[in-house]
Structure formats: C-alpha cells, structure tokens
Amino acid sequence: MSDNFHLTTSGIFRTQTLLDTLMEVGFDRNLFSVDYPYESMDELSPWFDTCPISNNDREKIGRTNSEKLLGLNKSAAA
C-alpha cells in the first residue's frame, strides 16, 4: 500500500503524528512541506529540526525523497 502514495509534513506540526505516520508509511514516502500561508518555514523548520529522527531520515524527508519523486538531478543543479 505505501508504494502508491507520498505524504507531506504540511499541516501536521505535531511530533507524535509525524512519528506515527513515519512508522506506518515509512521514511521513504514522506516529504517536508509547509501549509503556506497557514504555516511558515520560520515556524515549521525549528520543529522539524528537533524531531526525534536520525539525521539521515531528516535528510530523506527534507530533500532526497522529493528529488527522487520529482526526478531532480543534483549534479545538474550544481
């Protein structure tokens, strides 16, 4: 089931909800985002940075999962 969709952090802003989602769906199908204009990067970034997940998983959710989903090539952007 988890191979058919991706989830975002948009609108979550609650650590336990994020952790439950990650345990259910996995770290490879979650993307960092904010629900602008209702949330801002200034609000959500500090919360996300302190969530009790590994730096590797934070990197996946914050960047590499989006790159994979959207087919972005990091070397072309450099």
Image (spheres, grey):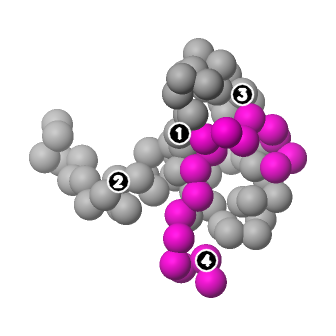
Q: CA distance from mark 1 to mark 2?
A: 13 Å
Q: Which mark is first along the chain, 4 or 1?
A: 4
Disc number lying in front (3 or 1): 1
Residue position for label 2: 67
- Which labelled disc corresponds to residue 2? 4
Residue position for label 1: 33
Q: CA distance from mark 4 to mark 2?
A: 18 Å
**From what the image shows, is residue 78 above or below residue 25?**
above
Q: Residue at x 77, y 65 (%)?
A: 23
Q: Which mark is first along the chain, 2 or 1?
A: 1
Q: Residue at x 52, y 27 (%)?
A: 36
Q: Position of residue 42 (x, y in %)?
A: 59, 16
The foreground one among 56 and 34 is 34
Q: Position of residue 73 (x, y in %)?
A: 21, 53
From where the camera sits, is residue 50 visible? yes
Image quarter (top left, top right, bottom left or bottom right) of the N terminus:
bottom right
Disc number lying in front (4 or 2): 4
**Are there few (<14), some (14-19), or many (20+) residues within 10 Å of tag 4?**
few
User: In terms of secondary structure, where does tag 2 sit?
Assistant: helix
Q: Which mark is first along the chain, 2 or 3?
A: 3
Q: Position of residue 45 (x, y in %)?
A: 61, 25
Q: CA distance from mark 3 to mark 2?
A: 22 Å
Q: Quadrant of residue 63?
A: top left
Left or right: where 65 falls relative to 78: right
Q: Amino acid at mark 4?
A: Ser
From where the camera sits, is residue 61 visible? no
* 3 and 1 marks in contact (CB < 8 Å): no
Q: Which mark is first along the chain, 1 or 3?
A: 1
Residue position for label 3: 47
Q: Inspect the magenta stretch and tell me whether residue 8 lies in it.
A: yes
Name the residue at the front extreme. Answer: 37
